[in-house]
Amino acid sequence: MKKTLEWVLPPEVAYDDIRFEQEVRNQLRLTPDTPAFIRKIRRSIDARSRQIKVNLAADVYINEPVPPLLSFEKSYTDVSKKDQAVIVGFGPAGMFAALRLIEMGIKPIVLERGKDARNRRRDLAAITKDHVVNPDSNYCFGEGGAGTYSDGKLYTRSKKRGDVRRILEILVAHGATSEILVDAHPHIGTNKLPQVVTAIRESILEAGGEIRFDTKVTDFILKDGEMRGVITHQGEKIEGLGVILATGHSARDIFELLHTRNILIEAKPFAMGVRVEHQQQFIDSVQYHCAVRGNYLPAASYSLVAQARYKGVEKGVFSFCMCPGGYIVPAATAPGEIVVNGMSPSRRDGQFANSGMVVSVDEADWKPYEKLGPLAGLQIQKVLEQTAFQLAGQTQTAPAQRLQDYVNGKISSSLLPTSYQPGLVSVDMTTILPPSIAVRLREGLKVFGKQMKGYLTNEAQMVGVESRTSSPVRIPRDKETLEHPQIKRLFPCGEGAGYAGGIVSAAMDGERCAEQLVAHYQNK
Ligand code: FAD
């Protein structure tokens, strides 16, 4: 017999497997020796009232064979002798495009400018300790892309739940915890992501796919309106059935290359601002209505949004990529700039809570850079990041200001302890942020102080600058075939092309591009 049941439980039962099993057995009046297998299928926290509850659903199999957890089966056939397609970039989009090509009988050749996950670690340490940024190996570039040393939150606004489930199952089949199939807000954590990414690489290599690290694409092979292949920085020409361009939102040289080769790209709205850091205990106490979170509840997160005016124009100020129990990391991709982002370990047990706090940037903001055409947004990002670098002392030490000081227009006389390892320096953030962001941020913070009592405090600080929230450029493509409108066999893919915003949506887009590339080839 199989029963699907739903419960509303206190956290100490919902998160403790032994007590939860007892609860199930009591409810179903099962004797201790009745064979029963419990598989949780959904779990979410309801923190609206003082009494925190966990909504939990599970399938219970009583005296019944248990079906496999995954409908996805990890079995990739050998494609080493098959036709090949080129994938540029080995982030989530590139990785999932490669796996899908293999499933469809095509050999992927993946070109990645960065290093494999393990060797990449040394370059991350160099950013933190020596303030040296390697333009090909950093928090955005290298095996697994921006997704490897990230927070590993896996939720997406996509309505295609079946496709989302498939991506999560592939991650589980490559070593991610099966809890991600259950939680409403699944999360892997930066300490676990490299193993998953490495396992995906192994699947690709075992199936006869090719992955070349330390291989930067610097030009395209274009002929008769078709993308025949690419040229690497070593001058090697690599051709294939098509090119999936999955280079992420920080591959500025790729946007510039597209533009100089007269391949249509468009400026696209994005968002910029700062990262705000509080004590995690404060966020827990507000969200869970208690002084201390207790052992069972995960570190609490928040999501805030407000409308704020500048020169009569209203725009959203919103929290972005909140990392409970996490760290602020130096995510620059070139020397001479400061960029911050956030990540957290799987246990989310760090002392601090950080979140991007950003304002949308659109056409009105890039007017001064109009002559740069589709690269105008890129220039806005660069100016902000380089100004932050200059004003914070020309290292990876980041500019910071306490929240209340910022709102009161006062330079902070001292800063708080932080998770940002290269260190902070007190700066008037309005000298870095353009007024259209600075003014709205100030208004937004005042609103957030009311929405979440205590949020606007001098016991929290902002760290600059959060500038890489999404791509400032869109590479257009046909809605159905996913090919570039001018260049056949070019498939703009993932976050950098403007079709994804996060790990799962980038992975889903990678799969779609692989499918369309194969369809193009089969229809010929
Ligand atoms: P990317 O991951 O950016 O991958 C692009 C790859 O292309 C890179 O590896 C790059 O080296 C390579 N490349 C670029 N140019 C070239 C070239 N010329 N030749 C060869 N290779 C090239 N998202 C979430 O969903 N949840 C999170 O919790 C989360 N946390 C994040 C934390 C941090 C610190 C960062 C930086 C990002 C985070 N993100 C998170 C965002 C997420 O990582 C991205 O949305 C996702 O990785 C985009 O996938 P992608 O494959 O499109 O591009």
Image (cartoon, helix red, strand yellow):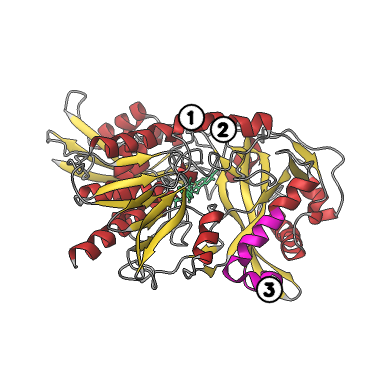
Q: Position of residue 400 (x, y in %)?
A: 76, 44
Name the image quarter holding the N terminus: top left
- Looking at the picture, tell me which residue is in the foreground, 315 or 490: 490
Give the amino acid at mark 2: Asp
Q: How many marks?
A: 3
Q: Is residue 329 magenta-colored?
A: no
Q: Which residue is mark 1?
A: 119
- Looking at the picture, tell me which residue is in the foreground, 230 or 371: 230
Callout 2: helix, strand or loop? helix
Q: Position of residue 176 (x, y in %)?
A: 36, 36
User: Pointer 3: residues within 10 angstroms few (<14), some, or many (20+)?
Assistant: few
* The CB of the residue at mark 2 lies under 8 Å from ligand 1: no
Q: Which residue is mark 2?
A: 123
Query: In the rendering, which numbered label is found on residue 405?
Result: none
Q: Which residue is mark 3?
A: 367
The residue that appears at 63% across and 34% down in the rendered structure is: 127
* The CB of the residue at mark 1 lies under 8 Å from ligand 1: no
- Looking at the picture, tell me which residue is in the foreground, 185 or 288: 185
